[in-house]
Image (tube, helix red, strand yellow):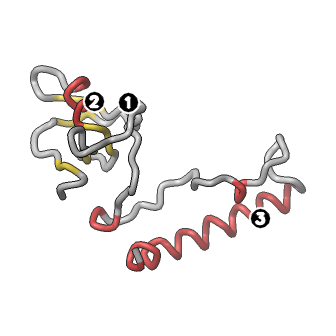
Amino acid sequence: ALRAGDAAMDKLIKYFAVVRRHDSMSGRGEPNGRRWVDDPELPVELGMPRELTFHSVLICPVSRERTSSSNPPMLLHCGHVISRDSLHRITKPNGRLRCPTCLAEQHSGHLSCRVCA
């Protein structure tokens, strides 16, 4: 976790500088009165190296269900993660699939189990 924090620090510093500048220019943040820094999640990808990318709990964006050891998270070639059951549902008979997040076309061969990797 320490290596992940170190790898993300420069990007986080730049992100929060932009957020502070945006909030100070608008006077109160977003139109609904919320500030960007009040959100519990970052609205940007940090682009972490694969060996430092992990989730303690992952909800599949396709099935909206929590992944488990019987339905583990699978890392797509584009870097997004979905559950194994969802991967099987969206994969065509020829093995091709489209990422539900970024729509990148890819082949299901050689995908890795995120828990096992």
Q: Is residue 65 above or below residue 117?
A: above
Q: Furthest residue to the top?
A: 93
Element type at mark 1? loop
Q: Are marks 1 and 3 in contact (CB under 8 Å)?
A: no
Q: CA distance from mark 1 to mark 3?
A: 35 Å
Q: Residue at x 38, y 64 (%)?
A: 48
What amino acid does circle 3 point to? Arg
The residue sitting at 27% across, 66% down in the picture is: 51
x, y percent for residue 7: 42, 75
Q: Which residue is mark 1?
A: 62
Q: Quadrant of residue 38?
A: bottom right
Residue drawn 61% across the image and 70% down it = 14
Q: Check whether the beta carbons of the residues at disc 1 and disc 2 lie within 8 A of each other.
A: yes
Foreground pick, 1 / 93: 1
Pointer 3 or 2: first along the chain: 3
- In this figure, which residue is indicated by the disc labeled 2? 86
Tell me the residue that label 3 is attached to.
21
* Label 1 vs 3, first from the N-terminus: 3
Q: Amino acid at mark 1?
A: Val
Q: Position of residue 20 (x, y in %)?
A: 76, 65
Q: Quadrant of residue 24?
A: bottom right
